[in-house]
Amino acid sequence: MDRKRCTAIVLAAGSGSRMKSAVAKQFMQLGGRPLIWYALNAVEQSQIIDDCILVTGAEDIAFARREIVEKYQFHKVDTVIAGGGERYASVANAMRVMAQGNMRVQNTDGYVFIHDGARPFLTESIIQKTYEAVQRYHACAAAVLSKDTVKLADKDGFAVQTPDRGSVWNIQTPQVFDAELIIEAYRSLQENMENLKQRGITVTDDAGVVELFTDIRVKLVEGSYKNIKITTPEDLMIAETFLS
């Protein structure tokens, strides 16, 4: 049996607002390199991932091509596209590119690895574990068990429930899916977006889209506590510590 094609979607369309930076966070320096370099390098070096769609701000496309893809010779980056105002819109744009076959090699029946470009500590081990899981379960997400006790609160901020910590996971990326499954799930999301907004339902990750619009269950795969997302200046300091 031929090995199915694996495409990575690397999301780098965020702003620097929570970082209190004029520079988009994905281009901020970490260990002497742009933050986005680390995720793209993990993709480039991977034995599993074949190609990549880089999603960035519309105004950053030329810069990303020149100063990231070409400068660091990330040959697996097939195309650089504009993201949307929300994360789901950025992924939906990438799904459209895949569905329409606008890549050097089409992939509508392989696997899709969706990863936040602001998570610099993606490893081949995490890629391998999620790859093995998606082959078996069709949908999976890297995650770690919560170290903290979690409380559910009412609208006034009073604790109403304490879930068993053994069943509470912090979700990470990559989140990995059968290509056909995730393309169709995002197509359904686009068609039902207004309805979801009216019902007050927000979508914060790709697994949530699959949960909403398919009957496929998402398998949680052990990620890494180092696989942090850089969101605040404090996160950047932690990342520098990890690097050193």
Image (cartoon, helix red, strand yellow):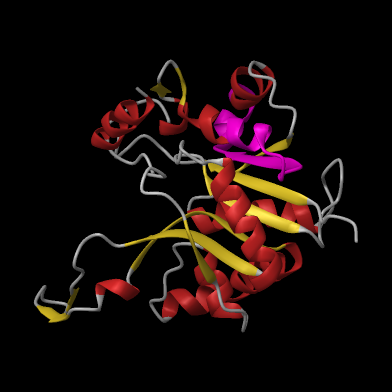
Per the rendered image, the range of residues in magenta is 40-63
| Residue 241 pos. (x, y %) | 29, 27
Query: Foreground: 90 or 181?
Result: 181
* Image quadrant occupied by the N terminus: bottom right
On screen, 212 above or below 88? below
Q: Which residue is located at x 61 percent, y 84 percent?
A: 215
On screen, 206 above or below 227? below
* Image quadrant occupied by the C terminus: top left
Judge left or right: residue 66 versus residue 101.
left
Evaluate whether residue 83 shows in this view.
no
On screen, 31 above or below 230? above
Query: Foreground: 198 or 75?
Result: 75
139 in magenta: no
Judge left or right: residue 159 versus residue 54.
left
| Residue 63 pos. (x, y %) | 59, 22
| Residue 147 pos. (x, y %) | 25, 59
Judge left or right: residue 148 versus residue 108.
left
Residue 150 found in image quarter: bottom left
Residue 148 found in image quarter: bottom left
Q: Which residue is located at x 38 percent, y 26 percent?
A: 243
Q: Which residue is located at x 46 percent, y 53 percent?
A: 223
42 in magenta: yes
Give the number of callouts: 0
| Residue 163 pos. (x, y %) | 24, 78
On screen, 172 above or below 60? below
Evaluate whether residue 54 shows in this view.
yes
Residue 81 found in image quarter: top right
